[in-house]
Amino acid sequence: MADIAHVFVLMMENRSFDHLFGLAGLDGVTPPPASWNFLAGAADRIASDPPHEFDDVAAQIGGTPPMSGFGTGAAAALAMRGFGPGTLPVISQLAQEFVLFDNWYSSMPGPTWPNRFFAHAASSGGLDNSPDSLTSAASETVHSLGFSFENGTLFDSLAAAGKKWRVYHADAFPQVLAIRGLVGGFFNGDTFRTISPKDADDAFAHDLHDNYDVDYTFIEPNYGLLSGNFADGNSQHPVGSMRAGEQFIQYVYETIRNAPVWPRCALLLTWDEHGGFFDHRVPPAAVPPGDANTNGARAEKPCHFAFDRLGVRVPALLISPWAPRGKTGSQLFPRAADAAQDTAFDHASIVRSVRELFGIGKPLTQRDATSPAWTAALLDTCRTSGSDGPRTLGAPLTPALAAAGAAASAATAAAATAAATVGGAAVSTAAATAAHAGAAQASAAIAPGATQVNEFATIAHALDLQMAQDLGGVPAIQDRALFGARLHAQPGVGVHATAVQAGAGAGPGPGAGAPAGSAAHGPDTQAVTDYVSYVARLAQAHKRRHGHR
């Protein structure tokens, strides 16, 4: 039996299995049939990601034959491109050295938030679409506004069993903070730590070489949200760089591989959902979680999904000296003769496997209870030293390949525009772009209604009170009046025209920066973005003050 004392999970963003591995030329991986016209030449980054909200995914996996919805619409030229041999050397080498699951699916046919919740609770609590930006920001910063789950989360089960858990985050605000009850630990204690590959004193590397005693570790990349468009992150969100994501994955792997924990650890690397990119495998049926619908109404557009089907296939890699070398999930878990469908893993398998490894708790949901565990892939004997995994990996995408990717991006964008025709009449570039823009981009162009504004003002007030207490009276209370003015933008109230500079020192007082006699004529939508940035800076100041990295 495998001797595993430490489990690490790194969840990246928005890539399907075929998009990353279908054309990579790896042994054991079946490429999409040629009839799909799925081609190599995916770019290092693209201007906007293919649509992947619930309705979009329903269209993509539907049609005749199934999965034919990717090849239509303005985003088809982007969705139908994958990475060819040698273009993703880091994850390709990991796939050759360890286990690549070609039978792992996102947990439901939809976007990031519900799928990430399945990794923590084997359920999304009924959430089947993205929450709006206001709900997202509020849930990650105010304790009482977090997303809740009837039977709790894996973190709760670990804590109840006396097991230690920790989250390392490269982003200022990890998505896991949206779970109710976790915000307090973010500001106090050691359950949340940063991971900074470019920092010589990175907490992750330091901790792993210092008698690391954490049983379960969840790692979140930098999403690039504070830049407003994902471009500066390393999560492999399509607007960001694949090269940056490969560098981050390489750093996480090499840090763990060269740490004392390596002989007794397992690292699971996966992607939360497909991001609108093509995959040819039809998502199989799934067992609904069966828990209470605690979060469904918080979607911006609830779709009342039954959670009886998995989402689009995504890659997952099991990396450990206890993992067999160069195997795929379908080789290790072949379809049983009497089975109705192939063995299908999803993010709930993380919960199931961690519970089994550490012998903790009962299943959180029916999905947890029925999901296969990847622990069955582990060897009974550890691979011998020297063959237990490379200490270093090959370099990520070269600058030349990145440049080639940029050229491919321009070509595919042009193809998308050319393909956007209706009745023979070409659609304008602007219209084509709008047609496949993400829901977040579309909603950002719409001014929040009065209800949202009032809700945000209430959230801002509660958050400011908490921040003022945590930071010992740093200027949070002063700034509430400023943001209130910008959010309500009442006639005769000055609108502050610049972003708040919130750090460990003083900030602008009420109405600072407002032109004399100025009057506002509608809600200031930029205030929401500025406020999230402001909160992130306060959080970082707080962590610096209390010695957290």
Image: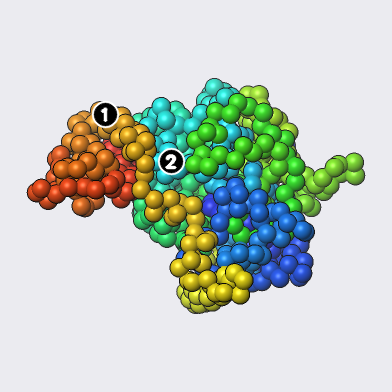
Nearer to the camera, 251 or 81: 81
User: Where is residue 54 drawn, in percent x and y?
Assistant: 60, 47
Amino acid type, residue under disc 2 in the picture: Ser
- In screen coordinates, is 457 left or right of 66? left
The answer to whether residue 147 is above or below residue 411 is: above
Residue located beneath label 2 in the image: 136
Amino acid at circle 1: Leu
Quick check: 31 left or right of 455?
right
The quadrant of the rendering that contains the C terminus is top left
- In the foreground, 23 or 341: 341
User: Is residue 169 something one can see in this rendering?
Assistant: yes
Dot 2 or dot 1, earlier in sequence? 2
**Residue found 12% across the figure and 51% down from its top:** 515
Q: Where is residue 75 in the image (x, y as percent from the top left)?
A: 57, 65
* Secondary element type, mark 1: helix
The label number, if any, that marks residue 465 in the structure image: 1
Q: Is residue 201 left or right of residue 89?
A: left
Q: Which quadrant of the figure has residue 107? A: top right
- Please state which of residues 139 and 129 is positioned toward the viewer in this rendering: 129
Q: In which quarter of the image is residue 364?
A: top right
Kindly identify which numbered label has been placed on residue 507. Answer: none
The image quadrant where one finds the N terminus is top right
- Relative side of 35 to 490, left or right: right
Residue plotted at (50% across, 75% down): 410
Q: How far apart are marks 2 and 1 (CA)?
A: 19 Å
The x and y percentages for residue 42 are 58, 69
